Image (cartoon, rainbow, N blue to C red):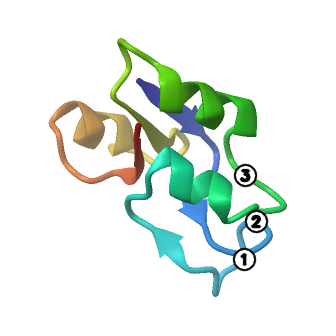
Amino acid sequence: MSYAEPQWAVHAGSGYTPDAEFIKEITASELLGMDLENLVIEPMVVELLKHADHINEVKILNCHTKGTIEKAIKGKNAGTIIPS
């Protein structure tokens, strides 16, 4: 499942700032355990991912950057991956 958002990905801290740490991959449990103030995705979606039978991961993509969706379709790194 891909989630397109006008933000690059998941960043450590309280939302995106230019110096925020980009998180390339993080499990649903790890992400929820960080208790971040602002997430690019609703925490309930991450919680449901932990128990999902048919969804293995969520990819957070910036849909406002040309070529990002194409990269994701081709299996290239294009944002943050949240495996269950």
Q: In the rendered view, would you say 83 is above or below 33? A: above
Foreground of the two, 62 or 45: 45
Write down the quadrant of residue 24 in the picture. bottom left
Residue on which the image places disc 2:
15
Spatial CA span between label 3 and label 2: 7 Å
Furthest residue toward left:
74
**Callout 1–callout 2 Cβ contact below 8 Å:** yes
Q: Residue at x 58, y 56 (%)?
A: 31
x then y, percent, for residue 36: 76, 63
Up the image or down, 58 lies above or below 39; here it is: above
Residue to which mark 3 is pinned: 39
Residue at image x 65%, y 52%? 32
* Amino acid type at mark 1: Thr
- Towards the viewer: 36 or 71: 36
Q: Which residue is mark 1?
A: 17
Residue shown at 64%/45% (left/top)? Answer: 6
- Give the crowd class for mark 2: few <14, some 14-19, many >=20 residues within 10 Å: some
* x and y percentages locating residue 67 in the rendered image: 33, 43
Q: Secondary structure at mark 1?
A: loop
Give the mark, 3 or 2, whose residue is nearer the N terminus: 2
**Residue type, numbered disc 3:** Leu
Can residue 8 be seen from the camera position used here? no
Q: Is residue 23 left or right of residue 15?
A: left
- Which of the two labelled residues, at mark 1 and mark 3, occupies the earlier sequence position? 1
Rounded to the nearest whole Å, what is the CA distance between mark 1 and mark 2? 7 Å
**Under tag 3, what secondary structure?**
loop
- Determine crowd level at label 1: few under 14, some 14-19, many 20+ residues with C-alpha closer than 10 A: few
- Is 33 rendered above or below residue 53? below
